[in-house]
Amino acid sequence: MANPQLPNLLAEIMSKIIELVGEESALYLGAFMRAGIRGYELVHEPSILKRCNVTHMVNESPCQIGNSGNFRNFFLKCVNVGNIDAVYYEGLHLSTTLGVEEGINVLERNVPTHVLSTLAVGIFYVCLGKEMEAITVFQQLAANGVDLKSEAIFEIGDELETRLLSFHAPFLNTYCRTLKFR
């Protein structure tokens, strides 16, 4: 069977199609990458990588963004161009494999604009016993209009705990006990 090729559409049109597909899910971009050099290059444009939705990739198989995972290289390219969700997931992944400090270093790129990253950094500082840094981060979160006593913030904290567990920390290193602050 012949190798599939992308039709001779204008680069702008193909780029827009790839952007829209990527915003739905980065998992759908594989067909474009396999369709030849042109598709591969278009998918790896920084503007596409920055906006593609990596959540489905992480939800379906979090181990695939790990060091030997099939999605690792693509995922890191998304992180390097500043894809907000990719930075968030990479920060959580590193916190379970290399340590909370490494996770904070990555997540700080999203603070204070991304609520999930900001909350994670604040909680990680609490886990490390760095109260002053945690207070600063939580104040930034509150300054962005987040009610730190709302039920919604506790739900976000529960989601954070679930996400950390999904990365299967080595040696059963879990954060369950340190994430309970009620």
Image (cartoon, rainbow, N blue to C red):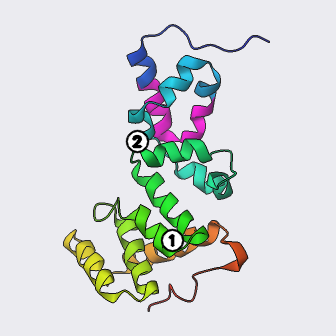
Question: Could you tell me which residue is drawn at 56 percent across and 68 percent down?
Answer: 163
At label 2, the amino acid type is Lys
What residue range appears in magenta?
16-30
Q: Is residue 58 visible?
A: yes
Q: Is residue 70 left or right of residue 177?
A: right
The CA distance from mark 2 to mark 1 is: 23 Å
Q: Secondary structure at mark 1?
A: helix
Above or below: residue 132 compared with residue 143: below
* SS type, badge 2: helix
The mark that comes first in sequence, 2 or 1, is 2
Q: Which residue is rendered at x = 31% and y = 81% of the image?
A: 133
Under mark 1, the amino acid is Glu
Residue 147 appears in the picture as rendered: no
Indicate yes or no whether the magenta region holds residue 182: no
Quadrant housing the N terminus: top right
**SS assignment for the magenta stretch, majority:** helix
Task: Give the residue displayed 38% in from the left and 18% down from the top.
Answer: 12
Q: Quadrant of residue 20?
A: top left
Label 1, residues with CA under 10 Å away: few <14, some 14-19, many ≥20: few
x, y percent for residue 71: 63, 45
Report the residue marked by disc 1: 159
In which quadrant of the rendered image does the C terminus lie? bottom left
Q: In the current view of this chain or complex, which residue is farthest to the left?
A: 143
- What residue did someone put label 2 on? 50
